[in-house]
Amino acid sequence: MTKRFVFLDTETTGLSAEAGDRILEIGCVEMENRKLTGNNLHFYINPERASHEDALKVHGISDESLLDKPKFAQLADEIINYLSGAHVFIHNASFDVAFLDKEFALCSKDSLSAYVSQITDTQTMAKQLFPGKRNSLDALCDRYGVDNSSRKLHGALLDAELLADVYICMTRGQDALLMDSEDSREVQLNVVKIDLSSYDLSTILANDQEAAEHLTVLSEIDKASSGKTVWRSLVS
């Protein structure tokens, strides 16, 4: 079964959806079977209110530049259709989900979780991998060597793209574990079967000196582990 992942980020007028702050930009990057598809979604949105000064310093998107942009209610159905059924990844998910749920509620829509298959917080993933360390998106880019030199200000689409790159780095060691039956079928191997029944295969046993050297090595390992080696316990 195809794995459709969407990496999502938003920019907002402030820090509190409950206090009336709104979404002014949304960016989504699609990935299927660990490959970017190019089928991305990106909107600037008229938030119908001004950005707080501190928020403006983060995203740099002026209030004036958003006046002619569509309102969230005009985009809600398109956003829902794009996200429908996807496994969504968000860095510090509680923040973005709170804003999206508030925007959907204002449009008389269900919350985000009603439309997607799963929501994963990549910041939580990072904290499990690197407890006690900085796990911001910038910190993870530095840690994994992901180029974020173009990130002078926060931008929803750019941050979603960086997050997708960071996710691939964070889970690279899990490739074999994550491969499902469909992934396996995509790998075509040319296997040549050889009938060995006609061959007389001889067994070469270790000589006495080699066997003695082998036992010496096993004894040294057993001693170093304070007698906790598995083969000793099985023999006893």
Image (spheres, rainbow, N blue to C red):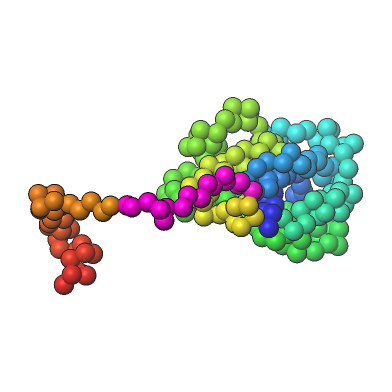
When asked about the image quadrant of residue 161, the answer is: top right
Task: Please state if 232 lies on the left or on the right of 92 as rendered.
Answer: left
Observer-nearest residue: 171 or 73?
Answer: 171
Kindly give the residue lying farthest to the front in the view shown: 198
Q: Residue at x 64, y 48 (%)?
A: 186
Q: Position of residue 91 (x, y in %)?
A: 61, 48
Task: Please state if 178 lies on the left or on the right of 219 as rendered.
Answer: right
Is 189 in the magenta? yes
Observer-nearest residue: 160 or 102?
Answer: 160
When asked about the image quadrant of residue 64, the answer is: top right
When asked about the image quadrant of residue 117, the answer is: bottom right
Compared to residue 142, the image places residue 114 above or below, namely: below
Q: Position of residue 196 (x, y in %)?
A: 42, 53
Judge whether residue 72 can be spotted in this image. yes
Image quadrant for the N terminus? bottom right
Observer-nearest residue: 127 or 49?
Answer: 127
Q: Position of residue 156 (x, y in %)?
A: 70, 40
Q: Residue at x 84, y 36 (%)?
A: 66
Q: How many marks?
A: 0
Report the predominant secondary structure element of the magenta stretch.
Answer: loop
Kindly give the residue lying farthest to the bottom in the view shown: 236
Q: Residue at x 68, y 48 (%)?
A: 32
Task: Please state if 235 lies on the left or on the right of 113 as rendered.
Answer: left
Q: Which residues are magenta?
A: 186-201
Is 99 in the magenta? no
